[in-house]
Image (cartoon, helix red, strand yellow):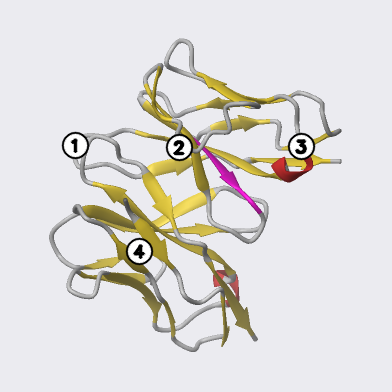
């Protein structure tokens, strides 16, 4: 079985400061890794994903995440946050087999203050 | 850009009543998921379809919840009878698996409040 742990339920940070949202996973099989973002009363939007290849993946709005197989982590980072980045961020894993079942972490609320 | 459509966006129902949610996935997406998201928690998979077949409903409370995808396109999730603890956001997602693409696309969700 797979599981995802997001240790920080809330991360407050000042605008233009760097931020890291932590994600660790557990799985007996190879997985794909995802970060989703959710704004209030909205569905989830894919932020970035790791399927294979380079362990560092980037999104179009400045976020990046690095897959670390030895530490089973997929932490999300941004060098300078904006007020508009305030949202809930979910890390998720999916088995690399026919099930493609998405398992989510409990989420981290990023609160950007002016 | 194609989207996953869900209706209604909001639903208030009384305890013990029946309630139903509808989802229309992105055209061509064979895989459809229903998730439940309790406030402050991550989404939890209720049921996963591949075309019209259920491939995973291990977390679906089958005594009161049912889901169908008769023609392998749109889907309905039903709760009967609703309980106070069913208050949550119900999210539908779809995915096309193949060609290096595996991410799920989510709808806006249905916010259910049971009173």
Identify residue for label 1. Answer: B99
Residue A70 lies left or right of residue A34; in this view the side is left
Q: Secondary structure at mark 3?
A: loop
**At numbered mark 4, what does the secondary structure look like: helix, strand or loop?**
loop
**Local secondary structure at mark 1:** loop
Q: Nearest the camera: B91 or A81?
A: B91
Q: CA distance from mark 1 to mark 3?
A: 42 Å
Disc 2: host chain:
B
Residue that protrudes farthest toward the top in the picture: B71
Q: Which residue is mark 2?
A: B1
- As measured in the structure, the alpha-carbon distance from the residue carrying label 1 to the one carrying label 2 is 19 Å
Q: Nearer the viewer, residue B2 or B5?
A: B5
Res. A59 mark:
4
Q: Where is the C terminus of chain A found, in terms of image quarters?
A: bottom right
Instruction: Give percent across and percent down for residue A5.
Output: 42, 67
Q: Indicate the chain on which mark 4 is placed.
A: A
* Contact between labelled residues 2 and 1, with CB atoms less than 8 Å apart: no
User: Is the Cβ of the residue at disc 2 closer than 8 Å to that at disc 4?
Assistant: no
Q: Residue at x 19, y 53 (%)?
A: A30
Q: Could you say whether the residue bearing mark 2 is in a helix, strand or loop? A: loop
Check the residue under mark 3 and report the chain it is in: B
Q: Is residue B111 left or right of residue B90?
A: right
Q: Callout 4 environment at 10 Å: few (<14), some (14 to 19), or many (20+)?
A: some
Q: Residues within 10 Å of mark 3 (few under 14, many from 20)?
A: some
Q: Dots 1 and 3: beta carbons under 8 Å?
A: no
Span shown in magenta: B34-38
- The residue tagged 3 is B83
Q: Position of residue B20 (x, y in %)?
A: 69, 24
Disc 4 to disc 1, how far (Cα)?
20 Å
């Amino acid at each position: 079985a797979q599981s995802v742990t997001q240790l920080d339920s809330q991360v407050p940070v000042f605008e233009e400061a760097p931020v890291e949202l932590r994600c660790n996973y557990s799985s007996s099989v190879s997985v794909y890794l995802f970060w989703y973002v959710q704004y209030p009363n909205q569905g989830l939007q894919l932020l970035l994903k790791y399927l294979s290849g380079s362990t560092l993946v980037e999104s179009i709005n400045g976020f990046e995440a690095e897959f670390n197989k030895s530490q089973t982590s997929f932490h999300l980072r941004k060098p300078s946050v904006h007020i508009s980045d305030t949202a809930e961020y979910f890390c998720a894993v999916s088995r690399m087999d026919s099930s493609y079942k998405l398992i989510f972490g409990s989420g981290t609320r990023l609160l950007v203050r002016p | 850009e194609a989207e996953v459509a869900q209706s209604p966006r909001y639903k208030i129902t009384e305890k013990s009543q029946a309630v139903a949610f509808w989802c229309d996935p992105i055209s061509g997406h064979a895989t459809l998921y229903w998730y439940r998201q309790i406030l402050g928690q991550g989404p939890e998979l209720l049921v996963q379809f591949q075309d019209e077949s259920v491939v995973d409903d291990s977390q679906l409370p089958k005594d009161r919840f049912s889901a169908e995808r008769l023609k392998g396109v749109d889907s309905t999730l039903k709760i009967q009878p609703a309980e106070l603890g069913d208050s949550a956001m119900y999210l539908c997602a779809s995915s096309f698996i193949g060609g290096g693409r595996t991410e799920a696309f989510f709808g806006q969700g249905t916010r259910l409040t049971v009173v």
